[in-house]
Image: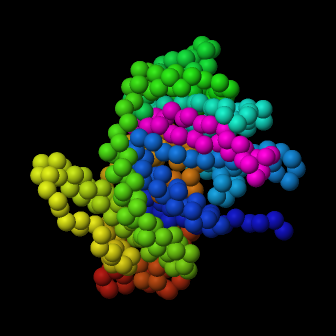
Amino acid sequence: MGHVECERSIRSDAFSFEYREDASDISIRTDLESLFGEYDFAVPLSRWELLFVSDEYGVSHLVSPYDREPMTIKCQRAIQKRKDSLKSTNREDAEYKCVCSLETQLTTASAGDMVFWTSPPGPKEDGYGKYGFFFVGQICAEKDTPHQKRISITAIHIDNQSVAQCNDSISLLTGESVYFSTAEDCIRNPKLISSIDEDKIKYVLSEIFHFVLDEERQKLFTDVMHMVKPYIDSFIQLNKQDISKRKIQKGFWALRNYVISLRDDLIDSLEHRKRNPLPSVNTFDKFIPFEALVHHFGSKPPPLVAGSCGSTGSNTPFKSSNIFNSLSSLFSLFSPEQSENFTCPRCERESVTPVGDTCPHCGLTKDEAQEKGFMTC
């Protein structure tokens, strides 16, 4: 019998969390950090690595180095999820074709070759914000595994990115005129280039996309992720326990609320030091047990998010222009999709089918819940 991958999900009014239970710790960590970087920091640069490897049948695939799952499978899962929700799959189809095109081109690529593509935001009404991404990838040889290729990719956050800018950038880099008309056209057409002048890349960033690296913001993100590393470890371990989804949800709320709190405190501290350049006491080196963190920060969902997503107060699903985030098993953490599941406020067990006014597990009724002061939906 083949390996069966299970999924676990947490849903609420504002967020849901879904991941494969065989996901590695480093995979969950990387996904969490990337999603925090996009939504809570608007971090200028995000870096990823993919491997181009052959399966047991000799077919080559782009895979994550952490779980070795083909990117095409991740794309297909994202497409099916949208179909199941009766939602458009235009963006997801384009991302799937992007990966397929990359795989085709990589079969003849050599170490040092580069790949470029763009991902402008979709319509605002579909949940996109005002920024997109410019992807720059470089193919690297693997000394110990000569039949494997490693692709180092940088996703560059571009504010107010337009399809016209994407056309100009790819035309300049490839020397061939392109006339994409939609964001999906840009996404599904990555370009492999064997030799390129680095000055062209700099020109594209500065003159076409008007990109200026915010080193202070990049460092702020790096510093906060270093500070919360122990709590990310604790959150990962929490997910391995046989506990209610409500407790896992509160753990995530606490983690993200703490990340946002640290971000804001550090920004205030930096502003204070600019006005008063005297040595200050570091107030961020005190370790708080994760249980205490959950108690303090986990009682309410994180604040509204602005970015390439709609606000958590709306029913518009969050949409990321970064393929690595949109295909992440943790992406639904940042989605406001409503849950149809019911979690009993007393036994905290979940029911996925209609239960009327009575919990099918412990027998608690709605009237009893109100009398005893439990929260009811």
The image quadrant that residue 111 belongs to is: top right
Horizontally, residue 293 falls left or right of residue 348, namely left
The image quadrant that residue 87 belongs to is: top right
Q: Residue furthest left?
A: 276
Residue closest to the eye, 270 or 303: 270
Up-down: is 35 above or below 236? above
Horizontally, residue 365 falls left or right of residue 8, namely left
* x 54%, y 26%: residue: 198
Whole-percent x and y of residue 317?
46, 47
Q: Quadrant of the C terminus?
A: bottom left
**Which residues make up the magenta segment?**
129-157
Horizontally, residue 370 falls left or right of residue 194, namely left
Whole-percent x and y of residue 3?
77, 66
**Residue 153 belongs to the span the image colors magenta:** yes
Whole-percent x and y of residue 233?
48, 70
**Residue 187 belongs to the span the image colors magenta:** no
